[in-house]
Image (cartoon, rainbow, N blue to C red):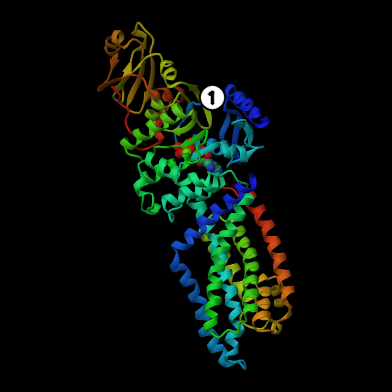
Amino acid sequence: MRIKKTLKGLYAMWYREFKVFQREKSRVISSLFLPLLWFFIFGGSMGSMTTMGDNYKIFIFPGFLVMTIIFASMFNGAYIVWDKKVDFLKEVLIAPHSRSVAFFGKTLGGMTDCLLQSYILMFIGIFLKIPYTPVSFLLSMFLLFALAIGLVGMGLILGSFMDSPEGFGLISSLVVYPLFLFSGALYPLDKLPAWLKIITHIDPATYAVDGLRNVILGTSTHSFLFNLAVIACFDIFFVIAGTWAFKRMKL
Amino acid sequence: MGLSLTKILYMCIISVMNIIEIKNLTKKYEKITVVDDISLSIQKGEIFGLLGPNGAGKTTTLMMLSTLLKPSSGSAVINGFDVLKNPLEVRDSIGMVFQDPSSDTVLTAYENLKLHALLYDVPMKEIDARIEKVMTLVELNGKKHDIVKKYSGGMRRRMEIARGLLHEPGIFFLDEPTIGLDPQTREHIWQYIESLSRNNGMTIILTTHYMEEAEKLCNRIAIIDHGKIIALDSPKNLIASLGGDIVVLRGADAYIDENKLSFKVQAKKLDGCLKITLKDMNKNLQELLNNAKSVEAVEVHSANLNDVFLHYTGRDIRDENGEEETDDED
Ligand SMILES: Nc1ncnc2c1ncn2[C@@H]1O[C@H](COP(=O)(O)OP(=O)(O)OP(=O)(O)O)[C@@H](O)[C@H]1O
Ligand SMILES: [Mg+2]
C-alpha cells in the first residue's frame, strides 16, 4: 500500500515537471543552440589552429553532451527557488509523503528534462558525423543517465539552500562554468599544471567526458567502467546529501 | 475482520475525543514569540475560526498544525496523530488552502488538480470524476483546461479551494479563504463551507480578519492578538458578553459625564470618537445623550465581533488592516 502510494507521489512530481517541460519548448530548443554554437564556432576555429583539424570538433563533442546536462540540472535546481517563491513547494511538502519522496520526485523530473536535451543532441550528432556505433550510442546514453542523477541532485541541493533566485544565479555561475571548464571538455587534461589537475579530479563531469570519449572515440585516460564507477559514487553521495538537504529545508 | 473491528473502535474513540487537541503550542523566532502558549480543543464537525489582525500568528498556527513548521514547544494532536511524531498521518488527515496562491501557473487547473489527486493517492479511476465535481462546485468546470496564469485572482482562489477538497479530507484548514473575492463569490464559498460541515461532518478551521465571515460561519471563535488567545467562545456568546449595544459619539472631544448617569457604561476613547457599550438601549439612550458633550454625530449599532475585539485589546481590528469592508448592520 505504502509502496503504491509512494510511486504515485513520485509520478505526480514527475508529471508536473514533464508538463512544465512540454510548455517550455522554446527553452529546450535554445538549450540545444548553445552547444551547437560552441561546436561549430569554437570547434571549427580552434580545430584549424591545432594539428587535429576537424577531429577536434569530434574530440570536444562529448563535452557538449555533458554541458547540456550541467546547464539543465542547475536550471532545474533554480526551479526550486522559484517554487519557494510562488509557494508551490508548500503544496508538495504538505502532501502525505516524506521529504525523501519529494527529493526523488524532483530528481526524476529534472533527469527527464536533462536527458531529453542531451539525447536530442546526441541524435543530432549522427548528422555531424560523430563516429557512433550502436553499442557506443547505448553506452553513452547510459553514462549520461548516470551523470544526470548526481548533477540533478547537486542542483536540487543548491536550490534547497537558496532563498532568492538572485543568489542562485551567483552560485550557478560559480558552479556551472567550473564544472564545465574543468571537465576537459575542450582540451586534453594531461597538459594542465598539477594544482589544476586536482580540481579536475573532483569534477564529476571529467569522468563523464572521459567515459564518453572512451566509447565514442576509443581514446581516454581511464576505462569506461572506471569512469562509470566514479560517477556512481558521486550519485550515491548526492542522493544521500540531497535527501538530507530536503529534510532540513525550511519554507 | 480484525482490521474492521479496530477501525470501528478507532472511530468510536475519535468521536468522543476532540479531533484537534492543542496544548501550549508556541513558536519563537529568535527572541520574538509569534504564537504564545496556545491551548484549545476542537470537536469533530465544528467550524472553528481564528480571528485576529495582521501578524497575530494565525498563519503560523496553521503551519504548525499542518506539520510544515516545527513548534518551539507544546504539542498538537490532529485526528489522533501527533504533529511531531506522526507528521505523515497528520498530513494524510488534512486538506489545506494556503493564504498565498500555491498552484503552478504554468499548468492548467486540471493538471494542478490531477497532480494533487496523485499526491494524495486518489484512486486513478476516480480522479477525473472528482475533478469535475469540485470544479463544478466552484463554478470553474468550463475553464478547467485553461492555464492558471490566465485565471483572475478570485478564480485561482476558488480553484485552490476545490483542490484542497479533492482528496476529501476529514479536517480542512482554510487560511483567509475569501480574501480578495467579490461579495457574491464570498457568499457562495460560505454556503459551501457550511454544507461541508453539515453534510460531510468535515471539521473546518479557518482564519480570517473579516468579522462578518467569522460571525456568520463559525460555531466557535478564538480571537488572537500578538500570538495569544484573548477570547474563545461562540460568536453569540462573545457578543453577549459585552452586555449591551454600541453607541458611537463622534467628535474629537466627545465626552460623557459618567457620574451623572443612573446606570453603568463602558466608554472607550478612540480616534475622533467615543465608543460606549450601553445596556437597555431603548430605555437608556436618551439619558446617555443628555449627559454627552461636544458630540458632532451619533451612531448606534448592535454589538458585533469588532466591538468584542476592541473590548479585549483596546484597539480596533481594522486599525492595522488598512482598507476593510464596513460592517454597519443596522
Ligand atoms: N520566518 C519568520 N521569522 C521571523 N518572524 C516571522 C517569520 N514568519 C512570520 N513571522 C512573524 O510572525 C508574526 C505572525 O505572522 P503570521 O503570518 O502568523 O500572522 P497572521 O496572523 O497570519 O497575519 P495575516 O493576517 O497578515 O496573515 C508576524 O509578526 C511575522 O512578522
Ligand atoms: Mg496569515
Residue tagged by mark 1?
B43
Q: Quadrant of the C terminus of chain B?
A: top left
x then y, percent, for residue A107: 60, 59
Q: Which residue is pictured at 44% across the width and 62% down the height? A: A23
Give the side of residue A202 with respect to residue A249, left or right. Answer: right
Above/below status of B101 relative to A63: above
Looking at the image, residue A31 lies above or below residue B69: below
Q: Is mark 1 within 8 Å of ligand 1?
A: no
Tell me which corner region of the image, top left, top right, bottom left or bottom right, holds residue B107: bottom left
The number of numbered discs placed on residues in the rendered structure image is 1
Hey, which quadrant is residue B236 in on the image?
Answer: top left
Amino acid, disc 1: Gln
Comparing A63 with B167, the one in front is B167
Query: Residue B149 or A180: which is nearer the viewer?
Result: B149
- Is residue A164 something one can see in this rendering? no
Q: Is residue B101 left or right of residue B40?
A: left
The residue at 31%/9% (across/down) is B284
| Front position in the image: A209 or B221 | A209
State whether residue A204 is above or below residue A162.
below
Horizontal relation, residue B199 to residue A58: left or right: left
Residue B106, x across and y down, in percent: 43, 56
- SS at mark 1? loop
Can residue B330 be seen from the camera position used here? yes
* Residue in the foreground of this view, choosing between A12 and B155: A12
Q: Position of residue A95 (x, y in %)?
A: 56, 44
- Give residue A122's position: percent from left, percent from top: 56, 76
